Image: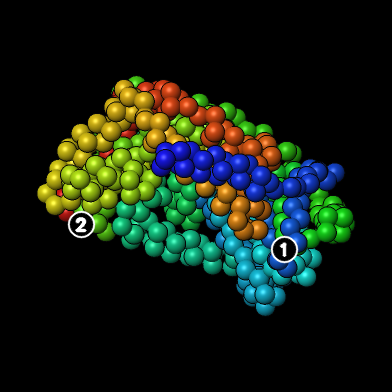
Amino acid sequence: MKNKLYTIACGLLISISGSAQEVEFTEYDLDNGLHVILHQENKAPVVTVGVMYHVGAKDEEKGRTGFAHFFEHLLFEGTENIERGKWFDIVSANGGRNNANTTQDRTYYYETLPSNNLELGLWMESERMLHPVINKIGVDTQNEVVKEEKRQRIDNAPYGKIIYKTGINKYLFKKHPYGQSVIGSMADLDAAKLDEFIAFNKKFYNPNNATLVVAGDIQIEDTKKMISDYFGSIKNNGEKITRTNIEEEPITSEITAVEKDANIQIPAKVLVYRTPKQTEKDAYVLDYISTILTGGNSSRMQKNMVEDKKMALQVIAFTDAQEDYGTYLMGALPLGDVSLDKLLAEMDSEIEKLQNELISEREFKKLQNQFENNFVNSNSSIEGIANSLARYNMLYDDTSLINKEIEIYRSITREDIQNVAKKYLNKNQRLNLDYLPESSK
């Protein structure tokens, strides 16, 4: 009876999730190449205006790393019509909030405001695109801000070089710029001239390299008119960006390395594999594998290494798929005097089980249910919907994935899980990293 009810519940969840999360949107291009996506949702008087630029750390020149992340800060300095240092004040004074973030592949800026301030958000983002003020005082100010951020998040943060991958990606990517960190080199930023920052802005922060998203309590035709008024006349400062496909040689033998961290007392064993880009189905399968291993209290590594054998204080496994490549990371912190070699053997054992045995039907159903639930909750906020629409359009070239991506997960089989584990999670294809306290010999 329990199994029957379990099956009915699974079916009900699938049927609900298939319709409950439909996100309707309108998309089109302006004559200047700016891609526009509109999502109307009038349940609450809130609107998000977001602009995603197709520029990230991978677009930086060697010797000038950190520019994309630097611009995440610099383009809040002010514009010809927004006084320096007043951006956040204007947004908060009008009942809103705003932020930005940068990855290897893109930079995203957004404001969330009461819907009666939609025009303000559009004006501010058009100002950022059209009239940014890039001068020495702004560059010097943000240089200190970025340095402090690096100190807080990486230099002085426990396990910072793992979390932000400054101690990982350099081993996996020898040709591709994914080998450099998003935050970049402070020496590179110090050495850069003002003209180089101006040139970077001119090259990348143009309408034809951007996606504008407006989501929330809007009227489509009125919003189109405002967008035309504020963005339609903005000209592109340079040619449309063309990117060279940089291919890495396959990893054919295990890379062993040691990184030290003055901020930790407990070492970590970390395994990292180079994996396919985010648009490939195998990248989705690796999401499933992460959940099998460490997705909750009943996951395999959590139950085996933390609860039953009490050999690990903490375990992690996650995939980070990006536009050109991905990485898959597994790690564990030892409990007591357990050696890193014992953690390694246990993690390898978990991988081998995935490679040699199909997961059970029950475990597979549970896994599917978790992802169905994630899908139901994935677009629960207007901010989240705006971000997803921009990301699927820019990095996947398919905005409709906001509604269809769950079908990719539903198409994954138990055999796919086994085959992907065999294809990517092999000892001769990985980085085997000992992450140690600075005092370790």
Q: Which residue is mark 1?
A: 43
Task: Indicate the position of residue 259 as horizontal and vertical percent values.
Answer: 27, 45
Q: Is residue 355 visible?
A: yes
Task: Indicate the position of residue 167 as horizontal and vertical percent values.
Answer: 35, 45
Identified at 48% across, 65% down, the residue is 144
Q: How is the image coloured?
A: rainbow
Task: Indicate the position of residue 431 as horizontal and vertical percent values.
Answer: 32, 34
* Above or below, comparing residue 378 to residue 432 in the picture: below
* Viewer-nearest residue: 235 or 301: 301
Identified at 76% across, 51% down, the residue is 38
Question: Do residues under tags 1 and 2 come within 8 Å of each other at their CB atoms?
Answer: no
Residue type (three-letter) at the residue carrying disc 1: Lys
* Viewer-nearest residue: 66 or 373: 373
* Above or below, comparing residue 312 to residue 113 in the picture: above
Q: Is residue 5 left or right of residue 439?
A: right
Residue type (three-letter) at the residue carrying disc 2: Gln
Camera-side mark, 1 or 2: 1
* Viewer-nearest residue: 142 or 222: 222
Identified at 60% across, 56% down, the residue is 380
Q: Which mark is residue 265?
A: 2
Q: Secondary structure at mark 2?
A: loop
Q: Secondary structure at mark 1?
A: loop
**In 3D space, how far apart are the residues under numbered discs 1 and 2 (Cα atoms)?**
50 Å
10 Å crowding of disc 2: few (<14), some (14-19), many (20+): few
| Quadrant in the rendering for residue 139 | bottom right
